[in-house]
Amino acid sequence: MIRLLLATSALALTTACATTNTSLPSIDENAFKAAIAVTEQDQRPVEIVETAIPLPLPGQMMPVGAGIATNPDGSVTRTYTRSVSRSSVSPTEAIQQGRSSALIEPSVDGYVNAIQVYPYTEGALYRLYASPGQVSDVALQPGETLVSVSAGDTVRWVVGDTTSGSGNTSRAHVLVKPISAGIRTNLMIATDRRTYHLELESTDGGYMAALSWRYPRDELAELTSRNTRAMTRKASSIERGLTLEGLNFDYRLSGHNPDWKPVRVFDDGRQVFIQMPEDIATTDMPPLFVLGEDGDAELVNYRVRSNYYVVDRLFRAAELRLGEKNQTVVRISKGERRTGLAAIFGG
C-alpha cells in the first residue's frame, strides 16, 4: 500500500513538472503579433528644499576685456584678457566690507516659536543678540559632536556647553551670556561635521532665546538617499497584492533551450508574469510576440521589472524570439487551470 502511494505521488510530480517540450505546437508563426515594451515612469515623492548658495567673495568676479587685431592676411584675431581692478580701499576697510557682506541677521520669517533658524552656509557669520542676565542657547544639529568652542572675549562673556537627549537624539548646546550691555565679541564652534562663526552683541533692548540651523545640503542628500531606497524596493518586487491562492502556474514551455529561457510563467487572472533567469542582462532579453485567447494576434503592452516580463493581459500563447536569421524561439502556451500539485509545480 505504501509503495502504491509513493508511486502515485511520484507520477503526479513527474506529470506536473514535465511541461517543457522540444517541439513547438502547430500554431502559425505569422499569427503572433509583437508586444510593445512600455517604459514605466516612476512617480517618486519629492520634497523641495533650499540648496546652499555659497556667498560671493570680494574680488571673485573679474571683468573680461576683449581685443581685436587684423592680421596681414586679412584674418581677425580676438584676444581675451582678465583685468583685476585694484581697489583703493585700505586693508581695514576691505576686512570690514567682507565681514559685513558675510553677516546674516535674524529675520521674522526665520523664527520657529522662540528659535531663530538660520540656513547653514559655510563661511557665513551669524548674528546673536544677547542681554545681561539672560542665557542664549546655540543648538547644533542632532547627532553632531562638539569638538571645541572659542570666544574672543572670555572675561565679559560667559560661554558653556551642555547636551540634551541621548543616543541618536543627543544634541549639543552652547550657552552664551554677557555680563554687561554694549559689548561685542565673536564665537567659533568646531564640530565633527562643520564650523560655525557667530557675531555676539549684547543689548538692553532684547535677546535671542535660542538659535539653530537647517542644513540644505543634508536635506538634499537625505532626499536623494530616500528616493534611491524607494527605487530599490520597487525594483525588488514585481507587483503588489499578489496572493499564492490566486496565481495560475499552468503554462508550458516548448521550443529551444537558450540560457535566457524563462524560469516560470504564471498569471493572477489579469496579468501574466514571465520570470527570466536571475543573471540575464537587459540587452539579452528577447522581444515578446503574443497570440490572444481567441487565437488572433493581439497588440499588448508589457513592462520589464527586475528579471520579470509583466504582460498587461492574458494570452493563449506567446513567443520569445531572439535573432533575425535562425531565430531562437521559446513558446509559452497556456494550459487548463489545474489545482493541487499540478497547479503549484506546473510551468
Image (tube, helix red, strand yellow):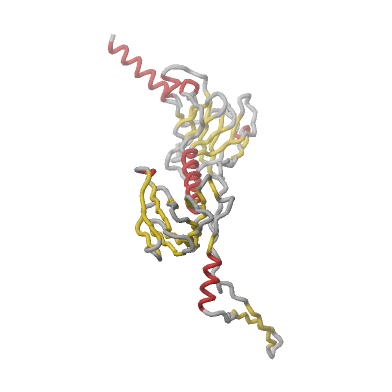
Residue in the picture at 43% in, 51% down: 139
- Locate residue 240, reporting x and y percent: 51, 30
Q: Residue furthest top?
A: 1
Q: Residue furthest right?
A: 74
Q: Nearer the viewer, residue 332 or 199?
A: 199
Left or right: 142 with respect to 38? left
Query: Where is the N terminus found, in terms of image quarters?
Result: top left
- Locate residue 335, reporting x and y percent: 52, 22
- Locate residue 314, reporting x and y percent: 58, 27
Residue in the picture at 52% in, 37% down: 329
Left or right: 53 with respect to 139? right
Q: Height in image: 38 above or below 178?
A: above
Q: Nearer the viewer, residue 301 or 61?
A: 61
Query: How many numbered callouts?
Result: 0
Task: Choose top left, top right, bottom left or bottom right for residue 75.
Answer: bottom right
Q: Residue furthest left?
A: 2
Q: Residue furthest bottom?
A: 72
Residue in the picture at 54% in, 29% down: 272
Q: Nearer the viewer, residue 224 or 84?
A: 84
Q: Height in image: 94 above or below 280?
A: below
- Locate residue 189, reporting x and y percent: 40, 59
